[in-house]
Structure formats: structure tokens, C-alpha cells
Amino acid sequence: MTIRDFSTGMALLAFLLGAPISATPQTDTIHREVEVVKAYAPTAIDAEKINEMPVIKDEAQRKPDFRYTIDGKPVFSTLSVKTLQAANIIGKPKDEPGFGLVRAGFGNYNKPYGELYFNNKKSKNSIFGLHAKHLSSHSKLTLLNGDRVQAPFSDNEAEVFLKHMFRKSTLSMNLGVTHNGFRYYGYPGTGEGDTIPYILKKEKQEYSHQGDKQAFTRGGININLRNIYATKSDPSAGLDFDYYRFGTKTGQREDFARFNMDFNRPRQGFSLLLNAGIEYSGVSSVYSSWPDITPLPGLLNVLPDEIRQLLEYDTDTRKQTWVYFKPAVFLGNETINLKLGFKSWIVRGKVDETSFKIAPDVRFNFSPVKEIINMFAGVDGDYHHNHYSAVACENPFVDPKLSVKNHLEKFRFFGGFDGRLSSKTNFKIQVDHSIFNDRPFYYLQGFDTPGAFPGPGPDYVDNTFKVLYDSLNITKFNGEITYIVGDKINVLLSANIYKYKMTREAKAWNMPSFDATVTLNYMVNDRLSVAADIYAIGKRTGLVKQYDFFDGIFVDINDPESLLKPALKEYTLETAFDINLRGNYAITSKLSAFAQLNNFGLQKYERWLGYPVQSFNMLAGISYSF
């Protein structure tokens, strides 16, 4: 990847306000795959991060490639908000690459932004560079129940990267740290009596995490060695190593390491494939079991011993070691081919029981008309390593002490076809059916003390999420189409429909019935580029489990299990419709201006139950390449 000349205009703000919706949006919506990278940053930009060669050289937009497999991560990832990417300007090519790029801007919600890229001039074999970024917001949000709360966040990055090209392979190394701070600002409610109880607004209250500060800090290193020029007919091998240390303001510390190798050994008429490796995760100060209920601290102190013993959970260190082995055989050619293999995992842990899991890995492809139509079908599965930082970064509002069980995607049956409608238009249609065991779902936990605070809901809700588990079948219908006209216009339309079947739970909590995205990029001329994203996500249902404390705060001691029989209160998260606009304008060959409008649809939809995103917000600034 290279650093492109990010050229945008302060004057572009007026242009965007007058631009037709059909001419642009991109970003700040909902990400459909769980790839944990960073913590909470609602509706904020994430200026393009350079992980490869950062050269100040303008280049044409690339045609996006379809990916035909589903990321094997927890499906609740579909609900995370995707941050707005800074738009890239395609300007006139320079004779010499520069040393770097600096960007600065400011937006409403008291949002300062700054970013710096620096790299050595392109040499024959090596590239070295630096990257630093700060984005924060220092403002309040109004919850759907009308309460106005402090909801600041801070997103910081610093990294050093190096790439060296050998004759047949490339060695990459990245050393970096991120620090993301935020508050537990949310609270569920519809405005019909579900406002935040006054006692939860007091400083140092122990009944909830309401208003508490949190921060995620992650520092680590990645080393990758790979032959990027090898084809399927060439022998190849690659390795990847990751290590990072992850810490929270609430006291959790995680070490995570992964070493992975993959091999391709072609033979006469077939190829032998192998992916194998080992993972380790160890986190401190988390629950040593999988509690169905976690008590509010303030109430725990006054409960009788019989009840307290039911509710107290020790904290401990959770350690896991994963060894995985995924061999396969590839048969055929570009017209018709078959991959036959399996995936296997052995997991040992201090809290987790030793387990062995296996899943198929089969895929068939047939292209009756080369580059025009391709049909595919297969079956595979995955075992999900739900280590602490993966869960915390995907849903930053989860209970800080909570551990989440690993879960198995036993089978994923998939099939469809993709191809080309014309030289400018590609398409894909796919159907997937996945079968999960112990699939995690998030919910909030409330406590009712009858007579204390009359109202329709529980008196207290802990606004950090707990996790319940259920078997789940998911059927997903997907359709995508891209339309590309040279370097001028790039359009992507994507839509998914989901069908869920649960074993015990009434609904697939927090899971959408559908989502759809329209992305458009348009190069007006050599100086001006504009872009747009339009995103929709169907209704979701959030859950609050309400536990009763009879006679004020005490349960019936003769029936302590009564505390563990909650009433279920459902909340509807309305359909989200989001429009985001952005643009860049090159003032000179080095000086540019940018502007972007986020959540242009003015909808304050909820990312998670009780946690709305910022409504309409904007960011504008300048960039300078040197």
C-alpha cells in the first residue's frame, strides 16, 4: 500500500452540503465481520492506516475484489460500527516520492484530529516508516430515553514499520501501540420511565458502571515472511508471528501470541496444502467460571450469606493454548478444481477443559465460461478463540471481568455463483447455512427492588453486557454487484438477509434481520474526488434480564434459586439508516483540504442496546505532503 496524496478542501464542505445524495457517501456504519482491531469510536473517522510501503505517490483506484468466504468470527460482529475512512485524492503524479504526509482537522462534538506519516524515500529493497494518529471527542450525547450523558472517546496510534524485499520473498515487520479511552455512557430505555435512576448518577456508586472510565491499551509486534509472487503451481512457504500485550483501566492484562506457517507443494496433477500453528492467550483478573448472573456490588454487600455464596465469583487467570492443523489437497485447474481437507484444533487451558475439535474444509469450483461465470459450493467450519481482547474490542461495553466461552461452528454449507455481466460489472450470489454450538449472545442485567423506585422497568440496570449461550442455525442470503468505469466511478451494492433458529432462546439477541450497503466513489477531476456510503440494518432485539429482590432487597431464603429466575424485558433497536459523505480537493500539488459529513441521515441509532452513536457530525481540515 502507498500513501496517496490526501487532498481535500475546506471549501468542499459547502460543495458537499449541496451535493446530491446519489453522488456520494462512505463509512461510519456497521461492520459485518468480526475482525477486532480497535475499541469504541462511534461515527469517527479512521484515516487510512498504512501497513505497507508509505509513498506519497498518487495512483488510480483499484477495482475491489469479492471475497467468497465468511470470516469465521462470532456473528455478533455484524453489529459493530465501521469507522469512516479518510477519502483519497488522485492527483497528478509526482516525479519524486515525498517523505511523508501530515493531516489536521476539527469537527463538531469537540473533535480534534491529527495524523502523521513519515517514510524514507523508496529504495531498491527496503522501506522504513512511522505513523502516528490522534482522534478524540469531548462532548455529550443524548440517550434515547432523553438523558444527556458524557460520552467522550480518544483514539491514539503510533507505529513503526519495515519491509524488505528479497529475491523471492518479502519480510515485513510492524511494531506499534494503540490507546483507546471511553466511558460506559449508555443506559437502555425508550423514554417511557426508563431513564437513568438518580442513584446511578452519583459519583463512586457501586450499583452500575454508569459513567465509569475505561481504556484499552495494546502494544505488540508482527513479523511476516511470504513469497508474494508465488502462484498455485509454485512451491511456497510463509510464516506469520504476532505478539501483543493488552491492558485495561479496570485491571485486566492479556498476553496473546500466535505463530502460523503455511505451505504449498505442487505435484503432478495436484497440490498439497498445509496451514498449521499455535496460539496462546492468558488474561488476569477475570471470572474463573461462566456465571449466569453477576450481582450488583452494592447489593451483594447486604445479602445474607446463603444468597451471597450463590452469587460470588472468584477472579483468576484464564490461560489457553491452541494448536491447529489444517491440511488439504487441491485438485484440478482454473476451469474446474476441488479442495479436500479438514481443520483440527487441540485446546488446553487453566479454566477451559481440554478439547479436540475437527471440521471439514471442502470447496468445489467450476467455471464453464472463463472469467464470465463461476459456480462454487462447499462445506467447512471453525472453532472460535474468544480470548479477552477479541471480545473486549468487538463489544467494548462488555463486563470487564467477563470471560467468554470458545464456540464451535460445526458446519457451514455454502454455494453460489459469481462472474461478470459486462466488462464493467461483476456480481456474486451466495447462500450460507451455519450450525453453531454455544454461540454467545450479549444481554444486560437488571435488578428490581419492589417499592423502591416505582416504574415499568427494573430499578437498576448494569450497563455492561453479560453473555448467554445457545445453539444457533443461521441461513444467510447474500448478493453483491460492482460497477466500475475506468478511474472515474466505482459503485458497490451489497445486501444480506438472515434467518435464525435458536434452541432455547426466544430470539437471536442483537442480530439483524438484514443489512445492505451502497458505496460510491467518483473522481470529478484530477483535483476533486467525492464518495458516499448509504447503509441500512434491520431491526434488532436487545435483552434485559430482570432479577427480583423480594421484600425490598432480600430474596426468599427458603427458595434462593428464585433469584435466578429472571423476567425477560425486550427492547427493539430500530432499523438504522445511515448516509456518510466525504471529499478531497487538491489546492496545490502538496496542500489539500478534506471534509466529511457522518450520519448525514440524522438518525441516532444504537450500536448496542442503550449506546447510541453520535448524530450528524462533520470533520474538516487540511493535509500537507512533504
Image (cartoon, rainbow, N blue to C red):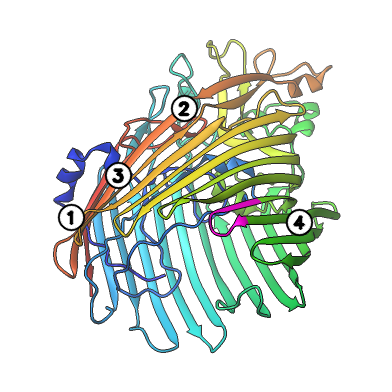
Residue 416 place in picture, x, y as percent? 63, 45
- Check disc 4 and give the amino acid type: Asp
Who comes first in sequence, dot 4 or dot 1?
1
Cα separation between marks 4 and 1: 49 Å
Cα separation between marks 3 and 4: 40 Å
Cα separation between marks 3 and 2: 21 Å
Who comes first in sequence, dot 1 or dot 3?
1
Q: Which residue is nearer to you in this view: 585 or 389?
A: 585
The answer to whether residue 252 is visible is: no
Element type at mark 1: loop
Residue at mark 1: 9
Magenta run includes residue 30: no
Who comes first in sequence, dot 2 or dot 4?
4
Residue 145 place in picture, x, y as percent? 42, 22
Q: Is residue 454 left or right of residue 305?
A: left
Per the rendered image, the range of residues in magenta is 368-375
Q: What is the crowding at mark 4: few (fewer than 14 residues within 10 Å), some, or many (at least 20)?
A: many
Element type at mark 4: strand
Question: Is the magenta region chiefly helix, strand or loop?
Answer: strand
Q: Which residue is nearer to you in this view: 45 or 152?
A: 45
Query: Residue 575: which disc?
Result: 2
Cα separation between marks 2 and 4: 36 Å
Residue at mark 3: 24
Q: Is residue 538 left or right of residue 120?
A: right
Q: What is the crowding at mark 3: few (fewer than 14 residues within 10 Å), some, or many (at least 20)?
A: many
Who comes first in sequence, dot 3 or dot 2?
3
Residue at mark 4: 361
Residue 187 place in picture, x, y as percent? 49, 29
Element type at mark 3: loop
Query: In the rendered image of this protein, does residue 19 appear above or below residue 87?
Result: above
Residue 139 place in picture, x, y as percent? 32, 40
